Image (cartoon, grey):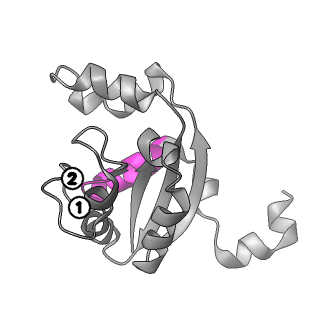
Amino acid sequence: MERTLLIIKPDGVQKHLIGEILSRVEGAGLTIKSMRMLQLDRRTAGRFYAVHRGKPFYQSLIEYMTSGPVVVTALEGLSGVNRLRSLIGATDPSQAEEGTIRRLYGDSIERNTVHGSDSAENGLVETAFFFGTAELDITTENAQDESYVNR
């Protein structure tokens, strides 16, 4: 089982694609472990995308990712990273395979609707960036147990 992060970016939220994207994710056999909608501030977006600091597109990426709400989702599944990457497609929507999320809904390399972890290692790092251990350890049985929910 691999954990991976999916972010539905501001353009995906603005286009009302949250349900469609999550349905595709679950249809691909990935389990939603935790999820929340939030508005990234510049500091948080800068920390998350620190690997791109100094690159020509960094400032516009930060501006874009803070321009509206996003949905961050921790996913889990067998070969979770590869499954998600196959589902979302190449970073450039014009280069993504037909039927992938980015090909269907992305407008450009930057406004490509979703972010997905690019490795199992980054999947763990990125999910931990947004979610605490308790949020990620919720199981279906625990979520239905009233005593667990009311802790």
Name the residue carrying label 1. Answer: 89
Percent across and percent down for residue 77 are 41, 75
Q: Nearer the viewer, residue 77 or 91?
A: 91
- Give the quarter of the figure containing the C terminus: bottom right
Which amino acid type is marked by label 1?
A: Gly
Which amino acid type is marked by label 2?
A: Pro
Main secondary structure along the magenta-highlighted residues: helix
User: Could you tell me which residue is drawn at 30 percent across and 72 percent down?
Assistant: 83
Q: Examine the rendered structure and indicate whether residue 109 appears above or below residue 60.
A: below
Q: Which residues are magenta?
A: 117-129
| Mark 1 surroundings: few (<14), some (14-19) or many (≥20) residues within 10 A | many
For residue 93, which numbered disc appears in the image? 2
Q: Nearer the viewer, residue 144 or 99?
A: 99
> In the image, which is nearer the foreground, mark 2 or mark 1?
2
Does dot 1 land on a helix, a strand or a loop?
Answer: loop
User: Could you tell me which residue is drawn at 51 percent across and 46 percent down?
Assistant: 13
Q: Is residue 92 magenta?
A: no
